[in-house]
C-alpha cells in the first residue's frame, strides 16, 4: 500500500477562493475585512512568514496592514500599539508575529489582543472557548489539520487519535478539536516512555514536535492517517517534516507531505478566521 497524499496546496486554493467570495460580499455591504500584522525585529523566518500572510490577504480581497518595528521597541510601546488596533473599527484581526525580542513578554502581548480580534487563536479566552466547546477563534494550524481530515471524508467518531506534541499553539488545541469530533485522544510528548506503543494503536497520528523522524514506518498501524505538522531541514538542507515520509507512506492510507501539506493551510485558516471576525460584526 502506498498512501494517498492530502494536498494542502489544492485544499488551500479552494478555501481561499471561498474566502474571496465572502470578502466580496462584505465589501458590497461597505465592510472591507482588515488584518493588522505586527513584526518586531529582523528575524528572517518571521519576515518570510509575514510577507506570505500579507500577500495571501491581498490575493483574497482582504485589507492588510503590515507594521514593522525595530527590535528595540519597548514592551509598553507594543502594548500601546495593540490597544490602538483593538479600538480601530477597520481592523478585524490582529496578529503579532512570534517570536518577539527577549525583553518583551509574548504572553502579555497575546493577552492584550482583544479576543474578538484574536485571529491566531492564541488568547486564553480562545483556548478556553475551544476547551468547553463555545464559539471562538481556533488556532490556525490545528484548524487546518481538521480541514484536511474533513477534505478526505474521514469520520473521526470512535477513532483513536494520537497527538505527538503538547504545545499551546498546536498539540493541545489539536487534541481538543479531535476530541470535539468524538475521537479518543492520546497526547504524547518528551516524557512519554514508549511513543511507539501509543502510535501503533492509532487510527490517526498528528506529529507536531519539530523533530525529524520522530515517527517512522515501524511505529505506524497499517492504514493509519498521518498528519505531519513538523517543519525541519534534512542533511541536504531540504525542507522536511517530523515524519519519515519515505517509509511511512508505504504503511499509511493517507499522509500529508512536507512541503505542500499543513504549511499552506495555516495561513489559509488565518484568512478564514479574519473573514469570520468581520462577519461577526
Image: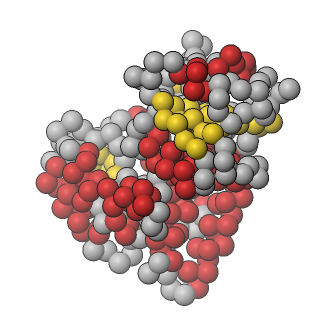
**Image side of residue 162 versus residue 260, left or right:** left
Q: Position of residue 117 (x, y in %)?
A: 38, 66
Q: Relative to the observer, which residue lies in front, 222 or 34?
A: 222
Q: Quadrant of the C terminus?
A: bottom left
Q: From the viewer's perspective, is residue 70 above or below residue 279?
A: above
Going 48% across and 57% down the picture, which residue do you hit?
A: 138
Q: From the viewer's perspective, is residue 163 above or below residue 177?
A: above
**Image side of residue 272 versus residue 113, left or right:** right
Q: Position of residue 31 (x, y in %)?
A: 49, 81
Q: Position of residue 192 (x, y in %)?
A: 45, 23
Q: Position of residue 144 (x, y in %)?
A: 59, 50
In the image, farthest residue toward the bottom: 29
In the image, farthest residue toward the right: 1
Q: Quadrant of the N terminus?
A: top right
Q: Relative to the observer, which residue lies in front, 231 or 46?
A: 231
> Can residue 52 be spotted in the picture?
no
Q: How many marks?
A: 0
Going 48% across and 35% down the picture, which residue do you hit?
A: 187
Coloring basis for residues: secondary structure
> Can residue 219 be spotted in the picture?
yes
**Image side of residue 231 versus residue 190, left or right:** right
- The answer to which image quadrant residue 258 occupies is top right
Going 72% across and 33% down the picture, which residue do you hit?
A: 224
Q: From the viewer's perspective, is residue 77 above or below residue 203?
A: below
Going 15% across and 48% down the picture, which residue do you hit?
A: 74
Amino acid at each position: 500500500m502506498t498512501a494517498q497524499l492530502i494536498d494542502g496546496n489544492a485544499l488551500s486554493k479552494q478555501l481561499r477562493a471561498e474566502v474571496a467570495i465572502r470578502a466580496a460580499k462584505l465589501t458590497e455591504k461597505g465592510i472591507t475585512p482588515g488584518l493588522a500584522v505586527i513584526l518586531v525585529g529582523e528575524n528572517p523566518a518571521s519576515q518570510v512568514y509575514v510577507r506570505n500572510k500579507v500577500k495571501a490577504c491581498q490575493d483574497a480581497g482582504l485589507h492588510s496592514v503590515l507594521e514593522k518595528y525595530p527590535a528595540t521597541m519597548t514592551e509598553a510601546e507594543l502594548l500601546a500599539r495593540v490597544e490602538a488596533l483593538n479600538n480601530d473599527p477597520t481592523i478585524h484581526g490582529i496578529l503579532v508575529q512570534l517570536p518577539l525580542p527577549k525583553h518583551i513578554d509574548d504572553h502579555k502581548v497575546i493577552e492584550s489582543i482583544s479576543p474578538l480580534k484574536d485571529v491566531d487563536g492564541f488568547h486564553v479566552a480562545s483556548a478556553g472557548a475551544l476547551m468547553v466547546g463555545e464559539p471562538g477563534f481556533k488556532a490556525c494550524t490545528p484548524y487546518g489539520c481538521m480541514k484536511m481530515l474533513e477534505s478526505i471524508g474521514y469520520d473521526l467518531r470512535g477513532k483513536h487519535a494520537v497527538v505527538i506534541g503538547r504545545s499551546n499553539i498546536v498539540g493541545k488545541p489539536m487534541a481538543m478539536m479531535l476530541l470535539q469530533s468524538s475521537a479518543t485522544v492520546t497526547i504524547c510528548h518528551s516524557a512519554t516512555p514508549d511513543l511507539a506503543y501509543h502510535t501503533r494503536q492509532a487510527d490517526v497520528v498528528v506529529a507536531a514536535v519539530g523533530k525529524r523522524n520522530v515517527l517512522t514506518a515501524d511505529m505506524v498501524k497499517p492504514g493509519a492517517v498521518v498528519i505531519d505538522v513538523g517543519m525541519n531541514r534534512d542533511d541536504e538542507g531540504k525542507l522536511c517534516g517530523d515524519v519519515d515520509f519515505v517509509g511511512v507512506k508505504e504503511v499509511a492510507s493517507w499522509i500529508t507531505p512536507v512541503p505542500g501539506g499543513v504549511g499552506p493551510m495555516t495561513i489559509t485558516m488565518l484568512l478564514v478566521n479574519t473573514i469570520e471576525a468581520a462577519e461577526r460584526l
